[in-house]
Amino acid sequence: MADVSATMDFRRRDAGDKLRGHTRYTVDRYLPGMLHAAVLRASVPSGRIVRLDTAKAARMPGVRAVVTAADAPGKIGIGIADHPLFARDVVRYDGEPLAAIAADTFAQAQAALAAIEVEIAPVTAVLTMAEALAPDAPLVHPGWRDHEILLEGGAREGNVAWEATVVRGDVDGAFARPDVEIIESVFRVGRQNHVAFEPRAVVASYEDGRFHIETSTQVPWGIRNATARLLGVAASQVRVTVPPVGGGFGLKFDLAVEPFAALLARASGRPVRLVNSREEEMLTCLFRENAEIRIRSAVTREGEIVGREAVVLMDCGAYGGEQIFLTTMTAHTLGGNYRLGAVRLVSRAVYTNTAPNGAFRCCNGVYNTFALERHTDEIAARIGIDPLAFRRRNVLGDGDLGATGQVFEGDVLGPMLARMDTLRDAAAPPRKLADGRLFGRATTVGTWFVFVGPSAATVNMNADGTVTLVTSGVEIGSGSMMQSLPQIVASTLGIDPENVIVRAADTDAAGYDVGVGGGRTTVALGAASLSAAQEVRTKLLKVASDMIEAAPEDLVMRQGRIEIAGAPGSGRTVAEVATRAQAQIGPVSGTGAFTGAGVPAMPGCVAGHFIDAIDIPVFAVHDCEVAVDRETGHVEVLCYRVVQDVGRALNPRAIQGQIQGGVVQGLGYALHEEVTIGTNGRVNQSGFETYRVPLALDVVPVEISLYEGAPSIGPFGTKGAGEVPILNVGAAIACAVANATGKRVQELPLTPPRVLELLLDRNQELILAHIAEAWADNLVRPHGASART
């Protein structure tokens, strides 16, 4: 049973130093004798390396080391190992690394880069997914068959890096029914840059035959293993520690600058610092991928969805990266909101000669939710049903099947919609705007999930009554490491969370962890920490029972004391018991581990998936009101409301902060942040001057209601709360703008020029001719057939 003492508005202990500028991030790290590194990058999107001569650069003043592809033999990836550290023979995107240099000063390193002699013969590039999927298109990876397969089951061929499919039920039969309307929608979204305030940064050293990497990352164990693979060394030769991280959002869920610094440290025998410039972050960072979506549904006049099919194209850029894994998400983000009679879905990660993309808060879910909710509104309009009534009728409830045949538990979305009705009804009624702007309102639903996976924790009891929590968790801004984990441990041991010391991540000290992301910290690391704390509790109660002369089961731990239940003031302090325990049996510690429960999918439904079904679904309902300027196309968000499924709110204030921040980040995706790629393959937005993010005047206060009680295997019934707030924002704003203007919204972001084109009927109808009309014609292999290698 959940401990009431675990729930509180506990303040972040790191807030003061961060606000005062005292926190030392990776970009602030300096070591004696440290060198400065720079990376030479290709300036063409596709080409053959004819010549790369570093001899002159190596003789430049201050240069201590130069490394190239010859120094990094391995390849990395998810599902398939297709990504080398440096371009080898072939350049696949503008900005791809060719060499790296370490010198006494950064200026000297840059000067040496300019002295590298490089000749690249241009090769025809494919810059869009339409180009990549065209018949006889140039192959981004001509040797795609030779890539090592890391996960069996995914289909792939040519410029299709990975394909994941879902088929459940008789979809053809559903679409052939005489009593259905068939509604088809197509959508397109662009890339989004994370713009974390701290760029990707690393300080690496090489001592006693081992690498020590201090880096700004969300995945210390991932960095450890991937760096070792690229460098061709044992993973045990790499130690990763993580200082405070200045923003992640998924950008730092993958390998970045670490191997360059590690190689240079080994070659030079000195510590090496490498920090991306803002331009490098903008031009080569792992954007949220651009995507193209076609959804087709068969719906009865009464509003029952009897069949649905969808094709989702995801631009992974030059290498598969996170998008290989993210193809899995479509099954749950397109197939986890509504009851579907029969369904078939395909996600295709497509190679293009552009900078690689990666994970970004609610990866895949943000644009699929936009597409699904716009499609839902189009269904309601076609069959003449109120959009809210249609949603109430069709949202998943207890015992309903998801797309993969997973059985969902509990009625959650229905009551959440009712909660939103209450919030909306309590607000002032909408009225015609006096300034002539168009008014629109929309309510949307969304389904996300907590990515669980393995986590480990150790709790060490200190003789002074404090405890030290050792994990590989990283504080990336959500507060989970500074708030929820100390609350969980403290409530178990009856102490104040201020007395829980959280050790910074160190792969030499803590057990394996998948990484911080996917809303998993409070759930996975929290469960491991709870288990470790319970072991410590058991040991302390046994020692205390001898000291107090009472059975362990008659004792309670509260307010820093171990007492006889029902007798406040009796017993001893936790510090006294810990001191006695240390003297009698040695230091007291506990270890805990956690991984997913493994919810089953329906056999045969999925192919090429990393997660067939979701252990912990998380639901969201968003409502927004907008005003659209008829003359300029500017969209102002007038008010925004969120009902979010949190399972159990350990720290309501912290969750509310995450929701406010997630909505603002979503506003950027919906209205402002646009990435375009020139004909030269280069991202046109190279800094804050050309990439528009939400400003202070764009921020709208969010009215928030936390929905508790939905089933969860998380500790005390918790769910991850930091990722899902962005999920519905693009959908809610797009639906509200469509309602305001009476126009069909098919693309994000809704920048003023794009909205003005809608208002003036000057936008061209979106046609995705490279997505085949027949669903099966979009597949590399028929669903269920053996993988092609």
Image (cartoon, helix red, strand yellow):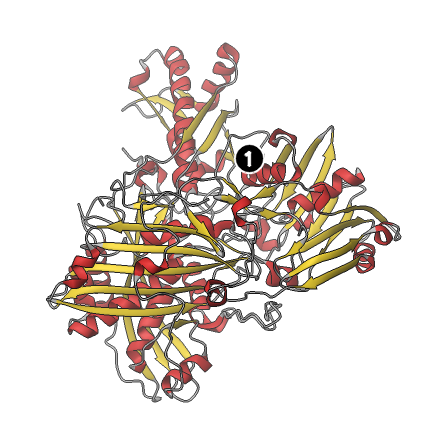
Residue 178 visible, this orientation: yes
Front-most of residues 593 and 422: 593
Front-most of residues 546 and 461: 461
Front-most of residues 624 and 43: 43
Picture residue at 53% right of the left edge, 61% below the top = 352
In the rendered image, residue 95, in percent from the top left (x then y), is placed at 65, 60
In the rendered image, residue 463, in percent from the top left (x then y), is placed at 52, 22
Q: Residues within 10 Å of mark 1 (few under 14, many from 20)?
A: some
Residue 560 visible, this orientation: no
For the view shown, which residue lies furthest in the front direction? 136
Say which amino acid is labelled 1.
Arg
Residue 622 falls left or right of residue 100:
left
User: Quadrant of residue 760 in the image?
Assistant: bottom left
Picture residue at 60% right of the left edge, 63% below the top = 282
Please tell me whether residue 34 is drawn above or below residue 170 in the rendered image.
above
In the rendered image, residue 647, in percent from the top left (x then y), is placed at 30, 45
Total residue callouts: 1
Please tell me whether residue 141 is drawn above or below residue 528 in the rendered image.
below
Residue 512 falls left or right of residue 678:
left
Picture residue at 58% right of the left edge, 34% below the top = 506
Q: State the residue position of label 1.
A: 503
